Amino acid sequence: MIEKTRIVVVDDHALLRAGLVRALALDPLIEIVGEGGSAMEAIELARIHEPDLILLDISMPGNGIEAARAIRELPSPPRVVMLTVSGDDDDVMGAVRAGAAGYILKGASAQDIIMAVTSVKAGGSFISPELALRLLSSNAQVQADPLSRLSEIEKSILRLISDGLTIRKVSEQLELADKAVEAHVTNILKKINATNPVGPEAIATQAWSELESSVKLH
């Protein structure tokens, strides 16, 4: 028998929290074991229920990032996915430093929310496609060359995104499904993370439009 993924959902907006719970309930392999509305409740629910994963609102009372940091220090910490209306780089950096494995913009589809949960539960990571697109397209420079870790299709996707194409346009040009392109974008971010010596927070603060002074993406 396949075990269900046990999840705690914490958001101070009751209607948004209810929407998240309804979205997650679409997957029969997900079980909601607790709900809360503050950082203090999040820590307590994580301690009592020992869920597989916890969804945290980044801006809830008590500070979601501080709650994530405290939860990751528990004896049996769950994987953490942050929820936010903001794509602010400082928020992303703070979430990653606190140990979050996922970052979802509120308003994401039920499919994306379930995809994020599934990926993070399996030991991976997830970032909302809209945010990943912005980070990859930002005009910054990384401190190591990640191209050696990217497949040819990932390089093609990265170049098209850096030229300003949307995920839909990239899909059309490369004749791929939108979801396939989104999955490639997530993998690109993970590979940049793996090769960047300054650590995972660099993904949130640097992104790229050029790899080195001699390697231009545009």
Image (cartoon, rainbow, N blue to C red):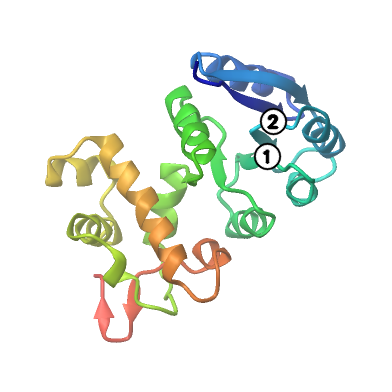
SS category of the residue bearing label 1: loop
Q: Type of residue at label 1?
A: Pro
Residue 6, compared with residue 170, is above or below; it is above
Q: Type of residue at label 2?
A: Pro
Determine crowd level at label 1: few under 14, some 14-19, many 20+ residues with C-alpha closer than 10 A.
many
Location of residue 55 in the rendering, given as x and y in whole percent from the top left corner:
65, 34
Identify which residue is drawn at 79% across, 35% down: 42
| Residue 98 figure quarter | bottom right
Image-based side of 13 in relation to 109, left or right: right
The CA span between labels 2 and 1 is: 6 Å
Identify which residue is drawn at 64% across, 54% down: 91
Direction bottom: furthest residue: 214
Image-based side of 210 in relation to 127, left or right: left
Q: Are marks 2 and 1 in contact (CB under 8 Å)?
A: yes
Identify which residue is drawn at 25% across, 39% down: 168
Q: Which residue is tagged 2?
A: 51
Q: Which residue is tagged 1?
A: 78
Direction front: furthest residue: 1
2, 149: nearer the viewer: 2
Location of the C terminus (image quadrant): bottom left
Q: Earlier in the sequence, mark 2 or mark 1?
A: 2
Identify which residue is drawn at 49% across, 39% down: 122
